[in-house]
Image: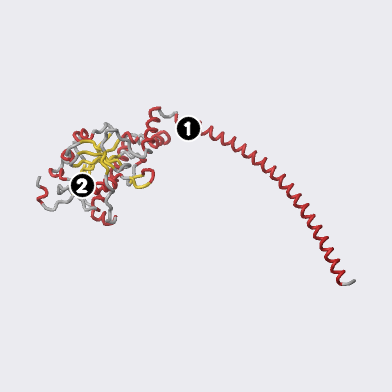
Amino acid sequence: MPVKAKFKNSIENLKSELKERQERLIKDWESAKRDLKARQKLFTREIKTKQDEFFLEWDDVQERSREKLDQWLDRFEIDELQAMLDRYKEENEPLETIGENDVLRQLPSPRKLEMTLQEALEKRRSSRDFSGEPIAEEMVAALLWAANGINRKNFKRTTPSALNWQDVSVYVVQANGIWKYLPKRHALLFIEGKDQREHFGEIKTWMKLASQHLVFVSDARKTETFTTKLLDKTFKVDFSEGELNERARAINVGVKVQAVYLAAVAMGLGCTCRLLVDDQKARELMKLAPDEKIMAICSVGEHPASIFDHVI
């Protein structure tokens, strides 16, 4: 057979073979598509069945959860639940609520504290003598921020608080009156006018020479929280009153006092912490409620340059 004819015959055979393979592939593909479609329908039915089973189980879980919640809520009185709800709303308000006629004094940004913690701890001491000179308002802002300021999201504070009570408020007693520090606003709320420092410095005659008295007040009403009630109802541990309550509130004040000490030494100020033996007049001036308790006072001010600074 001539070479040309042989080559032509080989090409025809190859075409025929390719056509047969193509037909088989098409048949296999059609079969695979039918199988895939059948599997898809089966899978869809299985998914639907599983989904229905899941929703039935989830409905059962929700129902059991509601029953558990109802049983747990039955342990509380209506006024307890309302108090916890009110406290939750108050904590999550972007700013402290103030009255229409309330007077606010916006504080400047706190002075930056450049001293290291190591240096501040080495130099920390109680200084009971003051020059009588007023300190800069940015220093006051730094002291208040260190004690009870907002330092991150969700109104979290510079100092810790047992069970997140946030029961301690800081009042500022200075030459132009008595003010309450509002951390969220970083502002002072006016409480009482005139210079009332003499009613907060009874131990030493020249204690009134302190530029400011920072008064730490703990409000027992703020310890009635969801967490406190949960511990009591679930674990029979009562933090709402008694010794545990007092110890926790004392810790809350103590950490703020130390923060003031460290901020004061970092700015070169004198600071001393003390108790107020007779606080009746102070309570009247600060307009405190029966559940609010003066826990401690930090007196701060410039160090005296000489003995003549004590002349009153």
Question: Is label 2 or label 1 in front?
Answer: 2
Residue 170 visible to the viewer: no
Q: Which of the labelled discs sits on residue 69, or is there none?
A: 1
Q: How is the image coloured?
A: secondary structure
Please name the residue shown 39% across and 33% down the image: 85
Q: Is residue 113 left or right of residue 7?
A: left
Q: Judge from the rendering whether residue 89 lies leftward or rightward of residue 69; answer left or right.
A: left
Q: Secondary structure at mark 2?
A: strand
Question: At 28% from the left edge and 53% from the top edge, which residue is drawn?
Answer: 112
Residue 72 visible, this angle = yes
- In the image, is residue 297 above or below residue 289? below
Using the image as rendered, state which of residue 22 and residue 97 is in the foreground.
22
Q: Amino acid at mark 2?
A: Val
Q: Amino acid at mark 1?
A: Leu
Which image quadrant is residue 93 in? top left
Task: Please tell me which residue lies in front, 84 or 30.
Answer: 30
Mark sitting earlier along the chain (2/1) = 1
- Give the spatial CA distance, label 2 vs label 1: 50 Å
Report which quarter residue 165 is drawn in. top left
Q: Quadrant of the N terminus?
A: bottom right
Give percent across and percent down for residue 11. 83, 65
- Residue 47 position in % (x across, y down): 64, 41
> Badge 2 is on which residue?
300
**x, y (%) of residue 76?**
41, 29
Mark 1, secondary structure of its residue? helix
How dense is the environment of label 2, judged by Cα within 10 Å: few (below 14), some, or many (20 and up)?
many
Q: Which quadrant: the C terminus? A: top left
